[in-house]
Image (cartoon, helix red, strand yellow):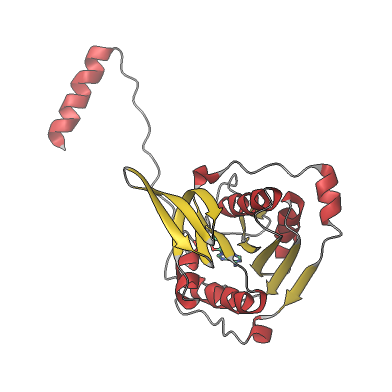
Amino acid sequence: MKIIVTVKRVVDHTVNVRVKSDGSGVDTANVKMSMNPFDEIAVEEAVRLKEAGVATEVIAVSAGVAQAQETLRTALAIGADRGILIESNEALQPLAVAKLLKAILDREQPQLIILGKQAIDDDSNQTGQMLAALGDMPQATFASKVVIADGSAVVTREVDGGAQTLSVKLPAVITTDLRLNEPRYATLPSIMKAKKKPIETIKPEDLGVDVTPRLATLKVVEPARRGAGVRMPDVASLLERLKAEANVL
Ligand code: AMP
């Protein structure tokens, strides 16, 4: 069974993101970039399925600028077998990415596609769902457990106030939630080995996909700053203050 995992290059989750002064977006100049954390979980899950003998090949796919090669190398170091870079300098929106991925699915015919539930840069939470619709495939989003058996995936999903277990027929789309697994650190030997694994580069035009943006970001603002704290002399005064504020609210 072939598995495709998608990996997006995003601003590293430890970076203190700054909004550009003109409010047009987030400043990414000279900022550390890494694999989207939910995608690390996707790669880890696919590699575990290969190690368990369920999958035969894991293909990592990234769409974006040439430097997304580094993100693919990380996926290869975790254990993916080969990479595909869909290279574009356009700002790729979820629908465009879903169409590009659909074109890759048509070519590779995987049984399982594992994406992150959302990219931490745009927080769209759309690509997996759109891909499932374009490919006319079942989807199980926010997976916290995946078991493959008899041509189906049994997926436990994190939902408000509990967990739901679904069975989806393969080929299917799964998106990962935080608790699906704990991704491994790539070891030095695996990083060295990954340098020899193949990465194919193609362009959206080669796949016949128009990636022109469909929506424009009007404004990005930073969250309101928290006001300064007040030190209370004792618990009694703290309770008084809380009661007073509750009455105001
Ligand atoms: P989003 O819908 O943008 O929140 O992204 C959801 C998931 O889709 C991400 O976690 C990735 O697995 C995948 N994805 C989105 N954009 C890209 C991209 N440019 N390249 C590869 N995968 C992507």
Looking at the rendering, in which quadrant would you find the C terminus? top left
In the rendered view, tell whether residue 247 sits above or below residue 145. above
Could you tell me residue 21's position as x and y percent?
51, 60
Given residues 232 and 186, the one toward you in this image is 186
In which of the image's four quarters is ligand 1 placed?
bottom right
Could you tell me residue 31's position as x and y percent?
66, 54
Could you tell me residue 73's position as x and y percent?
76, 57
**Can residue 178 be seen in the rendering of this structure?**
yes
Tell me where residue 240 sits by quadrant: top left
Please give left or right for residue 162 compared with residue 54 in the image: left
Could you tell me residue 151's position as x and y percent?
54, 62
Q: Residue furthest left?
A: 247
Please give left or right for residue 173 compared with residue 5 in the image: left
Residue positioned 69% across, 53% down in the render: 50
In the rendered view, tell whether residue 158 sits above or below residue 231. below
**Can residue 67 be seen in the rendering of this structure?**
no
Residue positioned 58% across, 59% down in the render: 27
Given residues 14 and 145, the one toward you in this image is 145
Please give left or right for residue 174 compared with residue 68 in the image: left
Given residues 176 and 35, the one toward you in this image is 176
Q: Residue furthest front?
A: 150
Residue positioned 57% across, 64% down in the render: 113
In the rendered view, tell whether residue 136 sits above or below residue 190. below
Residue positioned 62% across, 51% down in the render: 40
Tell me where residue 162 sits by quadrant: top left
In the rendered view, tell whether residue 53 sits above or below residue 161. below
Looking at the rendering, in which quadrant would you find the N terminus? bottom right
